[in-house]
Image (cartoon, rainbow, N blue to C red):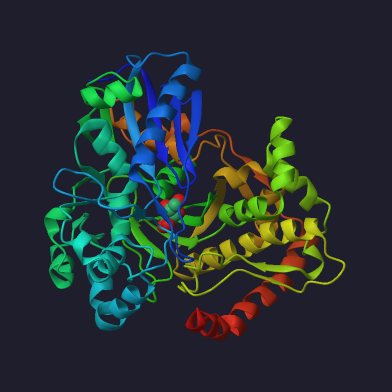
Amino acid sequence: VKALGQLLGIDVGTSGCKAIVVSEEGRLLGSALAEYPLLQPQPTWAEQMPEDWWQAAATAVRAALAEAGLRGEEIGGVGLTGQMHGAVVLDQGDRPLRPAPIWCDQRSAAQAEELAAAHGAQIAALTANPPLPNFTVTKLLWLRTAEPEVYARIRRVLLPKDYVRLRLTGTAATDVSDASGTLAFDVAGRRWSAPLCTLLQIPLEWWPDAAESPTVTATVSAAGAEATGLRPGTPVVAGAGDQAASALGAGIVRPGLASVTIGTSGVVFAATEGVLQDPPGRLHTFCHAVPGGWHVMGVTQAAGGSLHWWRDAFAAAERVVAEASGEDPYALLDREAARVPAGAEGLVFLPYLMGERTPHIDPLARGVFFGITPRHGRAHFARAILEGVAQSLRDCLELISALGCPVHDIRVAGGGARSALWRQILADVLARPVQVAAGTEGPARGAAMLAAVGTGVFADVAEACGAFVSGAEACRPETEAIARYLEQAEVFRALYAALRPVFRLAAAQA
Ligand code: XUL
Protein backbone atom coordinates (compact mmCIF):
# COMPACT_ATOMS: atom_id res chain seq x y z
CA VAL A 1 0.00 0.00 0.00
CA LYS A 2 1.43 3.35 -0.99
CA ALA A 3 1.75 5.53 2.07
CA LEU A 4 0.86 9.16 1.69
CA GLY A 5 2.66 11.88 3.52
CA GLN A 6 6.02 13.44 4.04
CA LEU A 7 9.10 11.53 5.16
CA LEU A 8 11.30 12.10 8.17
CA GLY A 9 15.03 11.31 8.31
CA ILE A 10 16.85 11.23 11.66
CA ASP A 11 20.66 11.25 11.78
CA VAL A 12 22.23 10.51 15.17
CA GLY A 13 25.57 12.15 14.37
CA THR A 14 28.72 12.74 16.41
CA SER A 15 28.17 16.41 17.14
CA GLY A 16 24.39 16.37 17.20
CA CYS A 17 21.16 14.81 16.02
CA LYS A 18 19.68 16.13 12.82
CA ALA A 19 16.09 15.64 11.72
CA ILE A 20 14.81 16.57 8.27
CA VAL A 21 11.35 16.49 6.75
CA VAL A 22 11.14 15.99 2.99
CA SER A 23 8.26 15.67 0.56
CA GLU A 24 7.70 12.50 -1.45
CA GLU A 25 9.64 14.17 -4.27
CA GLY A 26 12.60 14.78 -1.99
CA ARG A 27 12.02 18.51 -1.46
CA LEU A 28 13.40 19.72 1.89
CA LEU A 29 10.57 21.09 4.03
CA GLY A 30 12.15 21.41 7.43
CA SER A 31 15.39 20.66 9.20
CA ALA A 32 16.71 20.97 12.75
CA LEU A 33 19.82 20.06 14.69
CA ALA A 34 20.13 19.47 18.43
CA GLU A 35 23.71 19.17 19.70
CA TYR A 36 25.21 17.08 22.49
CA PRO A 37 28.64 16.82 24.05
CA LEU A 38 31.44 14.39 23.26
CA LEU A 39 32.96 13.17 26.52
CA GLN A 40 36.71 12.56 26.57
CA PRO A 41 37.51 11.51 30.15
CA GLN A 42 40.87 10.13 28.96
CA PRO A 43 43.00 11.24 25.98
CA THR A 44 42.08 8.32 23.71
CA TRP A 45 38.50 7.89 24.88
CA ALA A 46 35.37 9.24 23.21
CA GLU A 47 31.98 8.58 24.77
CA GLN A 48 28.44 9.82 24.56
CA MET A 49 25.35 9.39 26.69
CA PRO A 50 22.62 7.38 24.93
CA GLU A 51 20.05 9.48 26.79
CA ASP A 52 21.51 12.61 25.13
CA TRP A 53 20.96 11.05 21.69
CA TRP A 54 17.35 10.31 22.47
CA GLN A 55 16.60 13.72 23.98
CA ALA A 56 18.27 15.45 21.04
CA ALA A 57 16.35 13.26 18.56
CA ALA A 58 13.03 14.18 20.18
CA THR A 59 13.95 17.89 20.19
CA ALA A 60 15.16 17.83 16.58
CA VAL A 61 12.07 15.99 15.32
CA ARG A 62 9.74 18.47 17.00
CA ALA A 63 11.72 21.42 15.64
CA ALA A 64 11.90 20.00 12.10
CA LEU A 65 8.13 19.40 12.09
CA ALA A 66 7.56 22.96 13.33
CA GLU A 67 9.83 24.38 10.64
CA ALA A 68 7.99 22.38 8.00
CA GLY A 69 4.68 23.60 9.42
CA LEU A 70 3.49 19.99 9.68
CA ARG A 71 1.79 17.88 12.32
CA GLY A 72 3.09 14.45 13.24
CA GLU A 73 0.07 12.88 11.50
CA GLU A 74 1.38 14.15 8.17
CA ILE A 75 4.56 12.05 8.37
CA GLY A 76 4.17 8.78 6.46
CA GLY A 77 7.43 7.12 7.45
CA VAL A 78 10.64 7.53 9.41
CA GLY A 79 14.19 6.50 8.51
CA LEU A 80 17.03 6.29 11.01
CA THR A 81 20.73 6.70 10.40
CA GLY A 82 23.69 7.62 12.55
CA GLN A 83 27.31 7.31 13.56
CA MET A 84 28.43 3.69 13.25
CA HIS A 85 30.31 1.26 15.51
CA GLY A 86 29.47 2.69 18.99
CA ALA A 87 28.78 0.14 21.72
CA VAL A 88 25.53 0.84 23.57
CA VAL A 89 25.40 -1.77 26.33
CA LEU A 90 22.02 -2.32 27.97
CA ASP A 91 20.92 -4.24 31.06
CA GLN A 92 17.92 -6.50 31.51
CA GLY A 93 15.59 -3.51 31.64
CA ASP A 94 17.15 -2.01 28.47
CA ARG A 95 18.86 0.70 30.53
CA PRO A 96 22.32 1.88 29.38
CA LEU A 97 24.97 0.41 31.68
CA ARG A 98 27.51 3.16 31.01
CA PRO A 99 28.24 5.96 28.53
CA ALA A 100 28.73 4.48 25.05
CA PRO A 101 32.28 4.39 23.65
CA ILE A 102 31.81 5.67 20.11
CA TRP A 103 33.45 5.06 16.72
CA CYS A 104 36.52 7.25 17.29
CA ASP A 105 37.27 5.84 20.76
CA GLN A 106 40.72 4.21 20.71
CA ARG A 107 40.80 2.52 24.12
CA SER A 108 40.54 -0.98 22.68
CA ALA A 109 43.75 -0.69 20.63
CA ALA A 110 45.38 -3.52 22.63
CA GLN A 111 42.35 -5.81 22.21
CA ALA A 112 42.33 -5.15 18.46
CA GLU A 113 46.01 -5.94 18.20
CA GLU A 114 45.75 -9.16 20.22
CA LEU A 115 42.77 -10.30 18.20
CA ALA A 116 44.53 -9.60 14.92
CA ALA A 117 47.56 -11.60 16.06
CA ALA A 118 45.55 -14.55 17.38
CA HIS A 119 42.69 -14.83 14.86
CA GLY A 120 43.20 -12.20 12.15
CA ALA A 121 42.80 -14.47 9.15
CA GLN A 122 39.79 -16.31 10.58
CA ILE A 123 38.03 -13.07 11.49
CA ALA A 124 38.68 -11.64 8.01
CA ALA A 125 37.15 -14.79 6.52
CA LEU A 126 34.09 -14.66 8.78
CA THR A 127 33.37 -10.92 8.76
CA ALA A 128 35.28 -9.51 5.72
CA ASN A 129 37.06 -7.06 8.05
CA PRO A 130 40.02 -6.90 10.46
CA PRO A 131 39.73 -6.19 14.21
CA LEU A 132 39.97 -2.43 14.77
CA PRO A 133 39.54 -0.40 17.97
CA ASN A 134 36.75 1.47 16.18
CA PHE A 135 34.53 -1.57 15.88
CA THR A 136 31.89 -2.56 18.46
CA VAL A 137 33.31 -5.99 19.27
CA THR A 138 36.76 -4.77 20.34
CA LYS A 139 35.03 -2.26 22.63
CA LEU A 140 33.09 -5.14 24.20
CA LEU A 141 36.34 -7.04 24.74
CA TRP A 142 37.81 -3.99 26.46
CA LEU A 143 34.76 -3.87 28.74
CA ARG A 144 35.14 -7.56 29.52
CA THR A 145 38.67 -6.91 30.81
CA ALA A 146 38.43 -3.40 32.26
CA GLU A 147 34.89 -3.36 33.64
CA PRO A 148 33.89 -6.97 34.26
CA GLU A 149 31.04 -5.94 36.57
CA VAL A 150 29.48 -3.91 33.73
CA TYR A 151 30.12 -6.67 31.21
CA ALA A 152 28.41 -9.24 33.43
CA ARG A 153 25.18 -7.24 33.34
CA ILE A 154 24.97 -6.80 29.54
CA ARG A 155 21.82 -8.27 28.00
CA ARG A 156 21.73 -6.33 24.76
CA VAL A 157 24.14 -4.43 22.53
CA LEU A 158 22.87 -1.74 20.16
CA LEU A 159 24.39 0.76 17.74
CA PRO A 160 23.72 4.47 18.39
CA LYS A 161 20.83 5.01 15.95
CA ASP A 162 19.27 1.73 17.13
CA TYR A 163 19.13 3.00 20.70
CA VAL A 164 17.06 5.92 19.38
CA ARG A 165 14.90 3.36 17.55
CA LEU A 166 14.40 1.43 20.78
CA ARG A 167 13.17 4.59 22.52
CA LEU A 168 11.04 5.62 19.54
CA THR A 169 9.39 2.27 18.86
CA GLY A 170 10.08 -0.02 21.82
CA THR A 171 11.67 -2.50 19.38
CA ALA A 172 15.33 -3.53 19.14
CA ALA A 173 16.47 -3.84 15.53
CA THR A 174 19.28 -2.83 13.21
CA ASP A 175 20.10 -2.87 9.51
CA VAL A 176 22.74 -4.78 7.58
CA SER A 177 24.95 -1.77 6.74
CA ASP A 178 25.34 -0.63 10.35
CA ALA A 179 25.62 -4.23 11.62
CA SER A 180 28.57 -4.66 9.21
CA GLY A 181 30.60 -2.25 11.35
CA THR A 182 30.37 -4.30 14.53
CA LEU A 183 32.83 -7.06 13.49
CA ALA A 184 30.22 -9.64 14.58
CA PHE A 185 28.46 -9.64 11.21
CA ASP A 186 28.85 -12.07 8.34
CA VAL A 187 28.99 -9.37 5.66
CA ALA A 188 28.91 -11.85 2.76
CA GLY A 189 25.90 -13.72 4.20
CA ARG A 190 24.15 -10.54 5.48
CA ARG A 191 23.47 -12.05 8.93
CA TRP A 192 25.11 -12.18 12.37
CA SER A 193 28.13 -14.46 12.46
CA ALA A 194 27.47 -17.27 14.92
CA PRO A 195 31.02 -18.68 14.46
CA LEU A 196 32.57 -15.29 15.25
CA CYS A 197 30.44 -14.97 18.40
CA THR A 198 31.43 -18.49 19.44
CA LEU A 199 35.10 -17.79 18.78
CA LEU A 200 35.08 -14.66 20.94
CA GLN A 201 32.52 -15.95 23.45
CA ILE A 202 30.12 -13.10 22.88
CA PRO A 203 26.46 -14.16 23.22
CA LEU A 204 24.79 -14.13 19.80
CA GLU A 205 21.49 -13.12 21.43
CA TRP A 206 22.93 -9.76 22.49
CA TRP A 207 22.56 -8.51 18.90
CA PRO A 208 19.20 -7.25 17.58
CA ASP A 209 17.58 -8.58 14.38
CA ALA A 210 19.31 -7.17 11.30
CA ALA A 211 17.08 -6.25 8.34
CA GLU A 212 17.74 -4.87 4.85
CA SER A 213 17.73 -1.08 5.07
CA PRO A 214 14.32 -0.19 3.55
CA THR A 215 12.42 -2.79 5.62
CA VAL A 216 9.84 -1.50 8.08
CA THR A 217 10.92 -3.10 11.37
CA ALA A 218 8.54 -1.39 13.82
CA THR A 219 6.20 1.56 14.31
CA VAL A 220 6.33 4.58 16.62
CA SER A 221 5.13 3.63 20.12
CA ALA A 222 2.85 5.69 22.34
CA ALA A 223 5.86 6.79 24.41
CA GLY A 224 7.86 7.59 21.26
CA ALA A 225 4.94 9.63 19.92
CA GLU A 226 4.58 11.53 23.18
CA ALA A 227 8.26 12.57 23.07
CA THR A 228 8.52 13.48 19.38
CA GLY A 229 5.08 14.64 18.30
CA LEU A 230 4.88 11.86 15.71
CA ARG A 231 1.75 9.74 15.31
CA PRO A 232 1.75 6.39 17.14
CA GLY A 233 1.90 3.66 14.52
CA THR A 234 4.08 5.62 12.04
CA PRO A 235 6.31 3.05 10.25
CA VAL A 236 10.04 3.19 10.97
CA VAL A 237 12.44 1.52 8.51
CA ALA A 238 15.67 -0.27 9.45
CA GLY A 239 17.71 2.61 7.97
CA ALA A 240 21.48 2.57 7.57
CA GLY A 241 24.85 3.50 9.01
CA ASP A 242 25.63 7.16 8.29
CA GLN A 243 28.10 6.35 5.54
CA ALA A 244 25.75 4.13 3.55
CA ALA A 245 22.92 6.64 4.06
CA SER A 246 25.11 9.54 2.99
CA ALA A 247 26.10 7.57 -0.11
CA LEU A 248 22.41 7.03 -0.97
CA GLY A 249 21.80 10.75 -0.56
CA ALA A 250 24.57 11.32 -3.12
CA GLY A 251 23.22 8.63 -5.45
CA ILE A 252 26.06 6.12 -4.96
CA VAL A 253 24.04 3.00 -5.68
CA ARG A 254 25.99 1.16 -8.36
CA PRO A 255 29.59 0.26 -9.15
CA GLY A 256 31.58 3.05 -10.80
CA LEU A 257 30.21 5.72 -8.47
CA ALA A 258 32.01 6.90 -5.34
CA SER A 259 31.37 9.57 -2.77
CA VAL A 260 33.74 11.58 -0.63
CA THR A 261 31.93 12.61 2.54
CA ILE A 262 33.40 15.14 4.92
CA GLY A 263 31.60 14.93 8.24
CA THR A 264 33.43 14.64 11.56
CA SER A 265 35.21 11.75 9.84
CA GLY A 266 36.01 11.68 6.14
CA VAL A 267 35.01 8.75 4.00
CA VAL A 268 35.61 7.60 0.46
CA PHE A 269 32.80 5.18 -0.35
CA ALA A 270 32.44 3.05 -3.49
CA ALA A 271 29.53 0.75 -4.31
CA THR A 272 30.62 -2.75 -5.39
CA GLU A 273 28.99 -5.66 -7.18
CA GLY A 274 30.05 -8.31 -4.68
CA VAL A 275 32.17 -8.63 -1.55
CA LEU A 276 35.49 -6.96 -2.41
CA GLN A 277 38.17 -7.21 0.29
CA ASP A 278 41.48 -5.39 0.77
CA PRO A 279 43.64 -8.20 2.18
CA PRO A 280 45.48 -6.02 4.75
CA GLY A 281 42.07 -4.66 5.82
CA ARG A 282 42.86 -0.99 5.24
CA LEU A 283 39.43 -0.53 3.66
CA HIS A 284 36.15 -1.62 5.23
CA THR A 285 33.98 -4.10 3.34
CA PHE A 286 30.36 -3.63 4.39
CA CYS A 287 26.81 -4.33 3.22
CA HIS A 288 25.30 -1.40 1.35
CA ALA A 289 21.88 0.03 2.20
CA VAL A 290 20.84 -1.11 -1.28
CA PRO A 291 19.40 -4.58 -0.65
CA GLY A 292 21.81 -7.20 -1.97
CA GLY A 293 24.59 -4.65 -2.58
CA TRP A 294 27.97 -4.11 -0.92
CA HIS A 295 30.53 -1.35 -0.71
CA VAL A 296 34.10 -0.61 0.29
CA MET A 297 35.20 2.48 2.13
CA GLY A 298 38.31 4.17 3.44
CA VAL A 299 38.09 6.34 6.54
CA THR A 300 39.98 9.44 7.64
CA GLN A 301 39.27 9.58 11.36
CA ALA A 302 39.40 13.37 11.78
CA ALA A 303 38.25 15.27 8.67
CA GLY A 304 35.66 17.86 9.66
CA GLY A 305 36.79 16.87 13.15
CA SER A 306 40.20 18.47 12.51
CA LEU A 307 38.63 21.77 11.50
CA HIS A 308 36.21 21.58 14.40
CA TRP A 309 39.16 21.17 16.74
CA TRP A 310 40.95 24.11 15.14
CA ARG A 311 37.88 26.32 15.41
CA ASP A 312 37.38 25.56 19.10
CA ALA A 313 41.04 25.68 20.09
CA PHE A 314 42.26 28.68 18.08
CA ALA A 315 39.31 30.61 16.71
CA ALA A 316 36.96 30.62 19.69
CA ALA A 317 36.70 34.42 19.82
CA GLU A 318 36.05 34.65 16.07
CA ARG A 319 33.39 32.00 16.46
CA VAL A 320 31.53 34.13 19.00
CA VAL A 321 31.75 37.21 16.77
CA ALA A 322 30.67 35.28 13.67
CA GLU A 323 27.73 33.66 15.40
CA ALA A 324 26.58 36.95 16.89
CA SER A 325 26.34 38.40 13.38
CA GLY A 326 24.57 35.30 12.08
CA GLU A 327 27.61 34.06 10.12
CA ASP A 328 28.79 30.45 9.95
CA PRO A 329 32.17 30.42 11.77
CA TYR A 330 33.44 27.87 9.26
CA ALA A 331 32.78 30.35 6.43
CA LEU A 332 35.10 32.73 8.23
CA LEU A 333 37.89 30.12 8.48
CA ASP A 334 37.35 29.41 4.80
CA ARG A 335 37.78 33.03 3.80
CA GLU A 336 40.96 33.15 5.81
CA ALA A 337 42.32 29.95 4.21
CA ALA A 338 41.44 31.17 0.72
CA ARG A 339 43.97 34.01 1.09
CA VAL A 340 46.84 31.50 1.18
CA PRO A 341 48.13 29.83 -2.03
CA ALA A 342 47.77 26.09 -2.74
CA GLY A 343 50.35 24.20 -0.71
CA ALA A 344 50.09 26.63 2.24
CA GLU A 345 53.65 27.76 1.50
CA GLY A 346 55.11 24.51 2.72
CA LEU A 347 53.01 24.00 5.84
CA VAL A 348 51.78 20.39 5.89
CA PHE A 349 49.16 18.92 8.22
CA LEU A 350 48.68 15.23 9.10
CA PRO A 351 45.06 14.91 10.32
CA TYR A 352 45.74 12.04 12.71
CA LEU A 353 44.25 13.69 15.80
CA MET A 354 42.25 10.57 16.59
CA GLY A 355 44.74 8.03 15.26
CA GLU A 356 44.13 6.92 11.69
CA ARG A 357 42.31 4.12 9.91
CA THR A 358 42.93 4.23 6.15
CA PRO A 359 45.63 3.61 5.04
CA HIS A 360 47.68 3.21 8.24
CA ILE A 361 45.34 1.36 10.67
CA ASP A 362 47.26 3.13 13.42
CA PRO A 363 45.49 4.19 16.61
CA LEU A 364 48.79 5.58 17.93
CA ALA A 365 49.26 8.14 15.12
CA ARG A 366 48.79 11.79 16.14
CA GLY A 367 48.13 15.11 14.43
CA VAL A 368 51.17 16.98 13.07
CA PHE A 369 51.93 20.38 11.57
CA PHE A 370 55.20 20.26 9.65
CA GLY A 371 57.34 22.95 8.08
CA ILE A 372 56.39 25.92 10.25
CA THR A 373 58.35 29.12 9.50
CA PRO A 374 57.88 32.69 10.71
CA ARG A 375 56.00 33.35 7.46
CA HIS A 376 53.10 31.18 8.50
CA GLY A 377 50.09 32.77 10.16
CA ARG A 378 46.74 31.47 11.28
CA ALA A 379 45.36 31.44 7.74
CA HIS A 380 48.12 29.02 6.65
CA PHE A 381 47.19 26.63 9.42
CA ALA A 382 43.53 26.67 8.43
CA ARG A 383 44.45 26.01 4.81
CA ALA A 384 46.91 23.25 5.76
CA ILE A 385 44.08 21.49 7.61
CA LEU A 386 41.81 21.51 4.54
CA GLU A 387 44.70 20.25 2.40
CA GLY A 388 45.89 17.57 4.83
CA VAL A 389 42.40 16.12 5.09
CA ALA A 390 42.16 16.05 1.28
CA GLN A 391 45.55 14.27 1.07
CA SER A 392 44.32 11.65 3.49
CA LEU A 393 41.14 11.14 1.42
CA ARG A 394 43.37 10.70 -1.62
CA ASP A 395 45.14 7.86 0.22
CA CYS A 396 41.69 6.23 0.59
CA LEU A 397 40.73 6.67 -3.07
CA GLU A 398 44.03 5.22 -4.27
CA LEU A 399 43.50 2.04 -2.27
CA ILE A 400 40.00 1.67 -3.69
CA SER A 401 41.32 2.06 -7.22
CA ALA A 402 44.12 -0.42 -6.47
CA LEU A 403 41.49 -3.00 -5.44
CA GLY A 404 40.29 -2.95 -9.02
CA CYS A 405 37.17 -1.01 -8.19
CA PRO A 406 36.47 1.36 -11.07
CA VAL A 407 35.55 4.91 -10.07
CA HIS A 408 34.45 7.22 -12.87
CA ASP A 409 32.22 9.61 -10.98
CA ILE A 410 33.06 11.16 -7.60
CA ARG A 411 30.52 13.13 -5.61
CA VAL A 412 31.33 15.16 -2.52
CA ALA A 413 28.91 15.25 0.38
CA GLY A 414 28.64 16.07 4.07
CA GLY A 415 29.05 19.34 5.94
CA GLY A 416 32.55 19.89 4.49
CA ALA A 417 31.08 19.91 0.97
CA ARG A 418 29.42 23.23 1.81
CA SER A 419 32.83 24.88 1.53
CA ALA A 420 33.60 25.89 -2.06
CA LEU A 421 37.28 26.10 -1.15
CA TRP A 422 37.40 22.58 0.31
CA ARG A 423 35.62 21.22 -2.79
CA GLN A 424 38.21 22.88 -5.03
CA ILE A 425 41.08 21.56 -2.90
CA LEU A 426 39.57 18.05 -3.15
CA ALA A 427 39.31 18.27 -6.95
CA ASP A 428 42.92 19.51 -7.10
CA VAL A 429 44.33 16.92 -4.70
CA LEU A 430 42.38 14.03 -6.27
CA ALA A 431 43.37 15.46 -9.67
CA ARG A 432 39.92 14.85 -11.13
CA PRO A 433 36.58 16.60 -11.30
CA VAL A 434 34.26 16.13 -8.36
CA GLN A 435 30.49 16.53 -8.53
CA VAL A 436 28.67 18.29 -5.77
CA ALA A 437 25.54 16.44 -4.73
CA ALA A 438 22.59 18.80 -4.47
CA GLY A 439 21.33 18.45 -0.89
CA THR A 440 23.82 18.95 1.94
CA GLU A 441 21.57 17.29 4.52
CA GLY A 442 23.86 14.27 4.23
CA PRO A 443 22.88 10.99 5.86
CA ALA A 444 19.45 12.28 6.97
CA ARG A 445 18.41 12.56 3.31
CA GLY A 446 19.43 8.94 2.68
CA ALA A 447 17.43 7.87 5.72
CA ALA A 448 14.35 9.71 4.43
CA MET A 449 14.84 7.98 1.04
CA LEU A 450 14.83 4.60 2.77
CA ALA A 451 11.62 5.56 4.56
CA ALA A 452 10.10 6.45 1.19
CA VAL A 453 11.06 3.04 -0.24
CA GLY A 454 9.90 1.16 2.86
CA THR A 455 6.49 2.82 2.83
CA GLY A 456 5.93 2.12 -0.86
CA VAL A 457 6.45 5.60 -2.34
CA PHE A 458 9.14 4.07 -4.59
CA ALA A 459 9.61 0.52 -5.81
CA ASP A 460 13.27 0.41 -4.81
CA VAL A 461 16.30 2.45 -3.78
CA ALA A 462 17.39 3.15 -7.36
CA GLU A 463 13.98 4.64 -8.15
CA ALA A 464 14.15 6.77 -4.98
CA CYS A 465 17.57 8.07 -6.09
CA GLY A 466 16.10 9.13 -9.41
CA ALA A 467 13.65 11.38 -7.55
CA PHE A 468 15.74 12.48 -4.57
CA VAL A 469 19.20 13.02 -6.04
CA SER A 470 19.39 15.93 -8.40
CA GLY A 471 21.65 17.99 -10.57
CA ALA A 472 25.24 17.65 -9.56
CA GLU A 473 27.46 20.62 -10.37
CA ALA A 474 31.06 19.78 -11.29
CA CYS A 475 34.16 21.29 -9.72
CA ARG A 476 37.23 20.91 -11.98
CA PRO A 477 40.86 20.61 -10.93
CA GLU A 478 43.38 23.29 -11.89
CA THR A 479 46.60 22.15 -13.57
CA GLU A 480 49.01 24.17 -11.42
CA ALA A 481 47.38 23.15 -8.18
CA ILE A 482 47.47 19.46 -9.21
CA ALA A 483 51.24 19.67 -9.59
CA ARG A 484 51.66 21.50 -6.29
CA TYR A 485 49.60 18.91 -4.42
CA LEU A 486 51.44 16.01 -6.03
CA GLU A 487 54.62 17.34 -4.46
CA GLN A 488 52.83 17.90 -1.18
CA ALA A 489 51.63 14.28 -1.27
CA GLU A 490 55.24 13.10 -1.28
CA VAL A 491 56.02 15.05 1.89
CA PHE A 492 52.69 14.05 3.43
CA ARG A 493 53.46 10.35 3.00
CA ALA A 494 57.10 10.59 3.96
CA LEU A 495 56.12 12.34 7.18
CA TYR A 496 53.95 9.48 8.39
CA ALA A 497 56.58 6.91 7.49
CA ALA A 498 59.24 8.88 9.36
CA LEU A 499 57.08 9.54 12.39
CA ARG A 500 55.64 6.07 12.85
CA PRO A 501 58.35 4.99 15.32
CA VAL A 502 58.05 8.32 17.13
CA PHE A 503 54.29 7.80 17.60
CA ARG A 504 55.15 4.47 19.24
CA LEU A 505 57.80 6.00 21.46
CA ALA A 506 55.41 8.73 22.62
CA ALA A 507 52.61 6.21 23.25
CA ALA A 508 54.93 4.09 25.38
CA GLN A 509 55.66 7.14 27.54
CA ALA A 510 52.03 8.16 27.98
C1 XUL B 1 32.61 5.01 9.67
C2 XUL B 1 32.88 5.82 10.88
C3 XUL B 1 32.37 7.18 10.97
C4 XUL B 1 31.16 7.19 11.81
C5 XUL B 1 30.78 8.59 12.24
O1 XUL B 1 33.29 3.81 9.67
O2 XUL B 1 33.49 5.39 11.81
O3 XUL B 1 32.15 7.71 9.73
O4 XUL B 1 30.14 6.51 11.17
O5 XUL B 1 30.31 9.38 11.27
| Left or right: 227, with 337 as reference point | left
Residue 286 in the image: state x and y as whole percent. 34, 57
Looking at this view, is 106 or 215 the one in front? 106
| Left or right: 375, with 31 as reference point | right
From this view, report whether residue 145 is shown above or below residue 65.
below
- Res. 169 image quadrant: top left
Residue at x-position 46% and y-position 66%:
44
Looking at this view, is 43 or 6 the one in front? 43
Residue at x-position 45% and y-position 41%:
443
Tell me the quadrant of ligand 1: bottom left
| Left or right: 437, with 91 as reference point | right
Looking at this view, is 500 or 151 the one in front? 151
User: Is residue 255 among what the camera can see?
Assistant: no
Residue 269 in the image: state x and y as whole percent. 46, 55
- Res. 499 image quadrant: bottom right
- Res. 42 image quadrant: bottom left
Residue 25 in the image: state x and y as whole percent. 45, 23
